[in-house]
Structures are given as C-alpha cells and as structure tokens.
Image (tube, coloured by chain):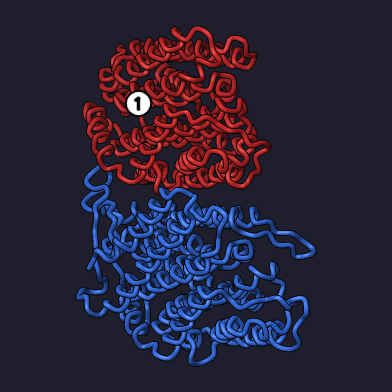
Chain colours: A red, B blue
Amino acid sequence: MFFGLIGVFACVASARFVRDRLLHAGEYYAFILLAVVGANGMAAASELLTAYISLELLSFSLYVLTAYAKFDLRSNEGGLKYMLLGAFSSALLLYGIGMIYGATGSTHFGDIGRALSKDTGGIDEALFLGLALIMAGLGFKVAAVPFHMWTPDAYEGAPLPVTALISAISKSGGFALFLKLFAEAFAPKIDDWRYFIAGLSVATMVLGNLVAIQQSNIKRLLAYSSIGQVGYLLMGIAALSPESGSALVLHMMGYVVTNLAAFVCVIIFYNWTGKEEIKDFAGLRDTAPFLTWSLSIALFSLAGMPLFAGFATKFILFQAAADQDLLWLAGIAVTMSFVSLYYYLVIIKEMFLGKAEAAVSMPVPWVEYGALAVLVAGVLFIGLYPAPLLDWVDGSTADVFAGVGQAAVAGR
Amino acid sequence: MGGVLFALVAVPVCTAVLVMLVPSRYPQLVRYLALLSAGTQFALSLLVFFAYEFDGGRGLRFGFRLDWLENVGFLGKHGISLHLAVDGIAAPLVMLTGLVIFAATFVSWNISYRNKDFFVLLFLLVAGVFGVFESQDLFFLFFWYEVAVLPMYLLIAVWGASSNFGSFVRTKEYGAMKLVLYLVAGSVLIFVGIFATFVEADRGTFDLPVLGQVQYDSDFQKAVFPFYMIGFGVLAGMWPFHTWSPDGHVAAPTGVSMLHAGVLMKLGAFGILRVGMTLLPDGAVYGAVSALAQTDLKYMVGYSSVSHMGYVLMGLATMNDIGVNGAVLQMFAHGAMTALMFTSVGAIYDQAHTRDMTTFGGIAQKMPRHSAFWAIAGLSSLGLPGLAGFIAEFHIFVGTFRAGYYWAGAAGILAAAITATYILRMLARAYFGPLNEQWENLREMRLGEQFAGALLIAFLLFMGLWPAPFIDRISDSVANIPGITS
C-alpha cells in the first residue's frame, strides 16, 4: 500500500512535467506502475527467485524511465550507466543466489534460516561468497558505497519525476527485501556479516555526506544526500533486531515522504524556470514563499531536525543501533547528520538571503501544491506523532522476525 | 496546575502557526498577536514562579505527562513522554524566559522587513526554550533544545547585521552559520551521551526521574559526563568552544540577541546541571576541575557574556550548595541584565548604525533614559550591591572559596574588578563628557523600549533587594542533586 502511495505521488508530480517535456506519455505511466508492482513484489517475496524477478521488474522499469528524455544527452548517459551497472549487479545477485542455494539447498527464506541455524560448524566458503555477492547486488540497488557510482549520474540525467521515483521506490523496495532476507534467512549467521554491513554503512554515510557538500546541482546534491541516508538505513540491518527492524521501516517511511516533498519542490521549481543549480534558488522566498517553506521543512527533516520526521525517526533508529552495542556506529551517524545540516543550510540560505536575478511571475500549480501540502503534512505528522505508525510497523516486523527470531537468538 | 507548563510550550507554538496564517499585508496585526502571546507567556511564567510554593509535591511541581511513544520496540512504559515539571531551579528560569520574550517583543516592534517570518521563528525559539526548562524527559529535553537552536540561523542570517571592524569584516551569514554549526556539533555529543545513558540504564524509558534513580557505574559516569559537559558547554559559552558567541551576538538583531544571550546560553548551563550533574554525579566531580581550568583571566574579561557565563560554570564546578545556588542565581541575573544591555545597545544602533563605542560621546545629554538603563545594566554586571548581579556573584565566590579553589575565586574577583573598569570607562567615554556633534540628532528610546527596559530593571532590583523567593526555591532543589555538599 505504501508503494502504491509513492506511485500516486510520482504520477501527480509527473503530470505537468511529462506534458511539457516528454514524448509517449502513456508508456511513461505504465512503467511507473510496473515499478510499483516490482517494489510490492520485493517487499512481499519470501523466496529468492521471486525476489529476484520482482527486483528486475522494478529495475528495468527504472532503466527505461531514466533514459526517457530521449533528446537529452544526460538522460541517455544516465540511463545507459544505470543499466550497465545494474545488469552487472543483477548478475552478481543471481550468482549469489546460486551459491546460497548450493550451500543450503533451498531458496525459501525460512528454509535457509533453518538450514543455517542447524549448521553450527565454521563458515562455509560457498555460503560466505554467496552472502557477499548478495550484499553487493542489493547494495547496488540501494546505492550503498562502494556500489553507488551510478546514483549521481542517473539522478542528474533522469527526468526529475523519475529521479524522485528512483530515490523513493528503489530504496524502499530494496530495503524491504534487504530486511526481510537478512532477518528471515541470514539471521543465524549474524556475527559473520554484522561488521561487514556496519562497515558498508559507515563508508556510505561518510562518503555520501562529505561529497554532497561539494555539489552545486540540486539533483546531484540530493543524490549524495540520499546515499548518506542509505548509510543510516544500513545501520538498521547491522543492528538486526525486531526494534531496529521497525526503526528502519519507520525511518524509511519518513525518508521517502520527506524526499518526495523535496523533489516535488524541485520539480515545481524546474517546471517554472528549467534550472536546477543551487544558485538558481536565490531569492525564492520573495517569489514563492510556500515553496520555500516547504523545501526548508523537507531539508531540515532530512538533516534530522526536530518537529519534522527526520528527527524522530533518526533518533529511534540510532537508539536501536546503540541498543545492539553499536554505539560507535550511532556516534558516527549523528556526526554525519551534523555534516549534512551544513549543505542543507546552504540551500536554505540561498532561498532566504539570495537576490533573485529577475522577478519571474510564476503560475501557481494547484495540483502540485496540493500534493506538496499533503507530503509536508506527512513530514510533520511523522515528526510529531509517530506512535500509530510505529505501532503498525512494529506489528509487521514482529511477523518477519517471529519465524526465525528464536533461531537467531540461539545462533548468537 | 500541570496545564500551565503545557500552555507555556503550546502558546508560542500556536502563535507561530497563527502568525504564519496572517496575510503578510497586515504587519500591525502580526505585532499585536505577538504582543498578546508574549504577554500571556509572561503572565503564565509569573504564575509558575509565584504559585510554586503553593503547589504540593516533592521536588517537582506542576507535573504534566503526555505519552508519545510507549510499549513499542525498545521502549517500555512511559518510554518517551512529554513529561513537563519544574523544580526550584527551573522555576526562576521559566520566569526569566517569560520576562525576556515579553521585553523582546516590545524591542522588536519596529521590525518591518518580513515581520511575519520573524515572529514565527522567534516564537518557535521561545517554545524550545520553555520546553528545555520544563522537560523531565531526556528525548524531549533534547528535542526542544534543537528547536531552540534551529531558528537562530534564519533569525540572524535574515534580520541580522554585518559588521565591519576595520581590519576584518564579519558578515551575518558567517555569524549565523558558525553559531548553528557550533551548537549542533555540541548536540552531536549530547546525542551520543543520551544513547549511552539509555542503554546503560536499561529501563526502557527516557524519563529523567526514572533515569535519576539508576545507580550508574562510576567508570561509565566518568566516561559519559564529558559528552554532556562539552555538548551543553558549547551553548553555555565554555572555553575553548565560545568563539561562536561574539560573532553570533554581534550579527543578531536586538530582540534575538536578548533571547540568545539572556536565555539561550542558560540552556547550556541548565543542561549540564539537569542532565550531567543530576544523572552522573561521579563524573561531575571529575569534570569540575576541567571547568575551573578555563577560568583564566583573558577569557574572563574577553567578552562580557562569556565571562558571566564563566561565573555560572564556576559556580556549578564548586559542587557545593552555595556555589550551585549562586550559579542558578547568576543565570537569572545575567539573563535580565544582558537583555537590558541589548535593549539599550539596539536602541542606539537603530539610530546611529554603529556600535563602535569609541565614536560616541556625551550621549547622556541626548538620551538620558537610555543612558540610565545602560548604567544600571553595567552596574549590575560589575556586581553593585542592591542589584541582582551582586547576590549571584557573592554566592559563587563564597562557594568557590569554600570548595577550596582559592586561585579560581581570586581570579573571578579580579575579573569582576576589571569588568568594573571597562564598564565605568565606557560610561565615561560614550555617555558623559562633551557631546560629539556627529550625534546631534539622536532621539530618546521609543516608549516600548523604555517599558521593556523598566520591566527588566524592576526584576534586577527585585532580585537584588529581596532575593529570598529565589534562594528559597533554588536551594530547595539544589539540595536534592546527588553529590552536592552543603
């Protein structure tokens, strides 16, 4: 259902953009829907091949969508890069699945988990290789460092609504699968992969946030900032526990809502001006106050500032990690979200303090503003009253962890 | 009565939302709304202070709880709740906040550039300040702390003023960015401290009274206390993390400076007291020496605000009741006094567009009331008996000597003497003596500013002449802090 909502917002946000700038609108929406189906499949899969097929469905829709602006070189470049690297990582993933099947004799998550918890001996090489390959494959899909290279180019090249869609759906789908797979299947071997994931997480958040400081294009900046966010999310996997699972899903939701809000703002701005450099946002406060405040709220939320979703969800996620003896990781994460505040403030500074070059009268896009208002309300809702959402998420992660929860504890 | 505390947080937040909805073509309506709200907050905060004695309860009064997250994930009963209550330490500080926001609203009356946005951010900031003073929950204490810090960036960057010091220029953007980055860097440390404390306590709750009952391992206390101490210390202007303070203050608009130097910096010292010293007394003993190490002379006389906050930290470091009482008294005294100083400075800057004191001369002839305000603030700052500063500094020095830190106490007194020198010299130079013709056209402060100043002076005199209500409330609660000797 959550993925469906993302799809709806993506369609609403796309409408004007597609009409103005793209050809073949019909297929465009069909691909968005296919991507949503793929993501739903990934979240629901409890078998490796089903998961793989759903993931490919999602990825292929996104490859095509990325390159959809046929006459834009950057779009083609981004799409090509995304597809080549994506195909490569799919191969890795498939190879990893093969290894796991060879080591455990099953592709069902539950059966793998049971096989692994019985196997009390040392680590099996084939199993370890399979695990590493799957981590690399999934790491690529969610853009974890060092498998993140495609992200900035694909984000920059893709038509803006598609960028929003990639950032939302490819990550949430990827993490849903990540969590489910590792909680149900690989939990018994947690000691073997925990620090590997923790290392990925550190590399991802440090690199994403530090490189983001340098960016002058808002899409690239959001691309690197989303890489940073992936680092925080990986903490939830590294700290694998029912608490961190629900914290991860909650943060994912907060992040997706916030990021969509940010992208809708950028899309509206792009529809007006056709520009996407940070310095082009100068003086936006005078021309479009609602847009400015919405974007500021979204950015502050991404930086993890209170009143907004980012603060509550990050706090819960980091605390869940600290609970699993990963206080150092939580410390790095907090430091990195402090770093991220800087580059978000730079954008906010431009909007409030910069001087607009020429006063452009901008038509008010009511549909987009409506979508934006709903998203901003969502950001505030998650930030101020996450209790119902967390209760709900907690229920579903409890199911995921129920099957092998005991086995995982016994295996530790 | 618990509703009072909730109202103190809710009123500014609701005002912010309400003001945001006012169309920007009615700036006057925005002003009256702001004044009404600030007046309400002032009245409520007076109620908290004066009704304190009549509300029964052990230590904490006016308790109020709104569960936010509980029985989910790693959180148990009352896991995270908006738990508001004040003790004798928080009560005067709540009143101070009410006083300063009321005065600041008068002083900010003439802001005309986007005054709607200004008041929205100002009231968010105030909600954060009230929230920190009242919170009895570690999560929400931190939540409000960040709410108080965040609006500062835009308040300074948009409404502030850049300064040219001749040899170098400090832009308002620089001051704002530096301030926010320093304070948020401090909060990173607090964040880590909170995580560590929660895990160590293992009670599944962030409720401070519950966390306070836990006996923490002594090594743990020593390891984690510095996180709180430095994290909150950044906001309290603790050396060597104080350099954001002069840059930020110089750049900030008057009303914001009043709140910032007057109240916000107190949040830092209050955080050390409320979280660090209350939860981790062993660590505090260990950290006290490091706090005293920074009472060196250069630092004490360098910047007035920083040096007065230095007294607060010195008082906390004594770890005995007189010294800690003095620290809390000093928070109040300095808050009211700085607000008064910034009111006067702002009044003259609005007309002269410079704050360079050397260019003034004989202003007293043109602005007698302004000069009187400035003189009173200055005299309180140098510790003249009868004004609030004296009571506070006296307590702190007695506490310091009793704790055996003789040289620190001596340095503090010497610094007070040096403060007296520069305050008196400035009075002589800028306010008395022959009038500099350049300032022929200066006019008296606006009526609103005069009212704000008079109100602040009333409280300086109140505490200076009749400190008993303050000391009663404060010492009552200070005695409950573990590790405080009498």
User: x%, y% of residue B211?
Assistant: 30, 61
Question: Which corner quadrant of the image does residue B248 belong to?
Answer: bottom right
Question: Which corner quadrant of the image does residue B473 belong to?
Answer: bottom left
Reply above or below: A26 against B200: above
Question: Residue at 66% of width from left, 85% of height from top?
Answer: B364
Dot 1 falls on a residue whose secondary structure is: helix
Question: In this rendering, would A303 be left or right of B466?
Answer: right
Question: Residue at 48% of width from left, 77% of height from top?
Answer: B451
Q: Which amino acid does label 1 sit on?
A: Phe
Residue matched to label 1:
A182
User: x%, y% of residue B387?
Assistant: 49, 88
| Quarter of the C terminus of chain B within the rendering | bottom left
User: x%, y% of residue A8?
Assistant: 37, 22
Of the pair B266 and A349, the residue shown nearer to us: A349
Q: Can residue B484 be seen in this view?
A: yes
Q: Which residue lies furthest to the right in this view?
A: B167
Of the pair B424 and A121, the residue shown nearer to us: B424
Question: Residue at 34% of width from left, 38% of height from top?
Answer: A247
Reply above or below: B96 against A218: below
Of the pair A16 and B58, the residue shown nearer to us: A16
> Which chain letter matches label 1?
A
Q: Is residue B211 visible?
A: no
Q: Residues within 10 Å of mark 1 (few under 14, many from 20)?
A: many
How many dots with numbers?
Answer: 1
Question: Residue at 47% of width from left, 57% of height from top?
Answer: B119
Of the pair B117 and B288, the residue shown nearer to us: B117
